[in-house]
Amino acid sequence: MSDDSFIREVDEELRSDRMKSIWKRFGKYIIALAVLIVLGTAADRGYDYWQENQASKSGDTFLAALNLAREGRQDEALEALRGLENDGYGAYAALARMRAATVLADSGDHQGAISDFSTIGNDRGIPTAIRDIARVRAAYLLVDHGSYEDVSAQVEVLTGADNPMRHSAREALGLAAWNQGDLIQAKQWFQQIADDTGVPAGITQRAQLMLDVITASGLGGGQS
């Protein structure tokens, strides 16, 4: 046997002895750690599966409710959506509340819809984007079923230059002022829309049409 072979064998024996010593001292802890890792991985995968399953169930219920509404079965759609409001997973609860308010509006219960949209708009537990959309929906309904002050209370806070809902908020305020006979105020809101380069084409066209009507009436305080 060469010296190198002898040294390797001795080294392997020493490593083996060290491993045995380490295992005697820490073996139970190593086993416990391994078990914890396995259990943790299983729990994590189990939770991921539960999340996916809950989201899938809520999504199926939401789609079924939408189909019921499209078929004109409003009462059944509303019942399904109310259930999701309480039991829906993730964003589905908020979406169900929004859709339920829309079902009320489509059914002619405008005050009920306004109340629901307003409640959503003031619920800080809901994402800001959904709250702002709810405020705008309430405002559009209030154009025909409320006063200018009612509309203002919902959406004037959204009319700032950096708010993505400003165009719809300004349009609702302009229409409410028009309905109330305040053409000067109406013109101011529609002019803000016309002067804003970031406005969607449809809203710009409607705003310009209203400005033309106000100008033609001679009651809007001068030319647009």
Image (cartoon, rainbow, N blue to C red):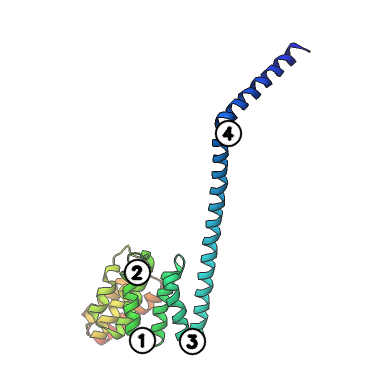
Which of labels 2 and 4 is toward the front?
4
Q: Residue at x 30, y 73 (%)?
A: 170
Q: Amino acid at mark 4?
A: Gly
Helix, strand or loop at label 1? It is loop
Q: Nearer the viewer, residue 50 or 56?
A: 50
Rendering coords of residue 70 (x, y %): 50, 83
* Residue that carries the numbered disc 2 in the rendered image: 132
Q: Nearer the viewer, residue 173 or 56?
A: 56
* Residue that carries the numbered disc 3 in the rendered image: 73
Helix, strand or loop at label 3? It is loop
Mark 3: few/some/many CA within 10 Å (<14, 14-19, 20+)? some
* Residue that carries the numbered disc 1 in the rendered image: 109
Q: CA distance from mark 3 to mark 2?
A: 28 Å
Q: Is residue 200 left or right of residue 70?
A: left
Q: As drawn, which residue projects farthest toward the top?
A: 3
Q: Are marks 1 and 3 in contact (CB under 8 Å)?
A: no
**Mark earlier in primary sequence (3, 2):** 3
